[in-house]
Image (spheres, grey):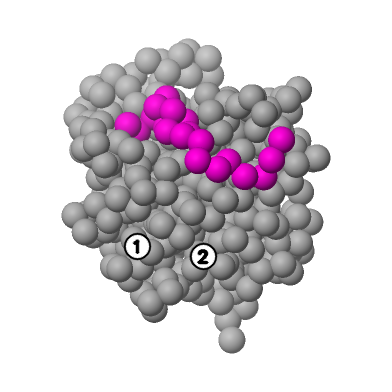
Amino acid sequence: MPLYPPLSLRAPSGGTVEVATPVVLAPMAGITNPAYRQLCLEQGAGLYVCEMITSRGIVERNPKTFDMLAFAPGETVRSVQLYGVDPEVMARGTRIVCEELGVHHIDLNLGCPVPKVTRKGGGGVLPWKTDRLAAILRATVAAADAYGVPVTIKTRIGIDADHETFLDAGRIAQDAGVAAIALHARTVQEAYAGHAHWDRIAELVEAVDIPVLGNGDIWEASDATDMIAQTGAAGVVVGRGCLGRPWLFADLARAFAGLDPRPYPTLGEVAAMLRRHAELLAGLHGERWGLIDLRKHMAWYFKGFPVGGEVRRGLSTVSSFAELDDLLGRLDPDATLPADELGKPRGRQGTSRAQVTLPYGWLDSREVGDADLSDAESDVSGG
């Protein structure tokens, strides 16, 4: 038996997605577009999930939503994360992406901590309402299962330390036929602050029979193997740790295969990776807009490296390949990353919120009843 068995995502009717290396790229708005997913896919094995898409945008045929539902040539497994609060709309959106786009795997976002979502009862606070959660999961699983497509969910520990939902969510998901559950081991209140509570992942592993994937504080490949060893998780979900570091998936593939780690890339190797990212983005958006989109990644790629202020400023405004190549040519290709930069957090961090923004009376009951939560979808990117 392999040290780290493949991850099997199984629909109730038997349709299965096999993930040879049990690693999943977390959907990240504005980041995990087809170009970035292709770049990560070129580095190592895993499951690469599209940016979060609203089910209502799909059902209403929103052009922006369908623009986001694009896939790279290398994506033989098409994976989409859906967001929604209405069971029927979720089911209809699921049927559309399965039938018209040939999607092979659907993940449901039940962990978003953004106030504009939580204030209307969506994202990470929705699992508090167990009746709505169960209805959404049953409807989505039934719609996807007609095409043999497995459904997974990604959630959090709960709203805050006094209002945990992850164990109930896991049991409800299992009963609904969900193939696996990913737990970001923080509460909505914690957002991305502090340290992830890996012990809660272990609790969920003990509580359910479906595969549990761990998420939170995976900055290096060794963090992933440590998480699995400590929690018994069936795999990991990687988000912020791969920002500016798509080669993390190659490192993960080696670690999960029991191979020795590789040296951290030199500055020249990082520049070559960024150049490949630029090519993929230009293929998606055209040269100018592709390189404008690349700007947000610059600080992540070169974090900790001796780049110099003038080059950094130039990279932050680059809009052509001529500019990019000139700036990259000024870097010392043999420069290495200082050892004390390894394992540091990347991307969003901040502090815990004083309190989570919720609809009035949200915590009074674990049931939402017939309340209409459709406004929770209106401000979410993707339609």
**Quarter of the figure with residue 102:** bottom left
| Label number found at residue 144 | 1
Q: Residue at x 56, y 61 (%)?
A: 173
For numbered disc 2, what is the local secondary structure?
A: helix
For the residue pair 199 and 144, the one nearer the viewer reads as 144
Nearest to N terminus: mark 1 or mark 2? 1
Percent of width and height locating residue 325? 31, 27
Report the residue marked by disc 2: 176
Judge whether residue 117 is colored magenta.
no
**Start-end of magenta stretch:** 364-383
Depth check, mark 1 against mark 2: the one in front is 2
Disc 1 residue type? Ala
For the residue pair 188 and 248, the one nearer the viewer reads as 188
For the residue pair 314 and 58, the one nearer the viewer reads as 58
Percent of width and height locating residue 305? 57, 31
Judge whether residue 365 is colored magenta.
yes
Image: 354 above or below 96: above
Disc 2 residue type? Ala
For the residue pair 103 and 18, the one nearer the viewer reads as 103
Residue 279 relative to residue 32: left or right: left
| Dot 1 alpha-carbon crowd within 10 angstroms: few under 14, some 14 to 19, many 20 or more | many
Distance between the Cα atoms at labels 1 and 2?
Answer: 12 Å
Q: Quadrant of the C terminus?
A: top left
For numbered disc 1, what is the local secondary structure?
A: helix
Percent of width and height locating residue 59? 26, 42
Residue 97 relative to residue 111: left or right: left
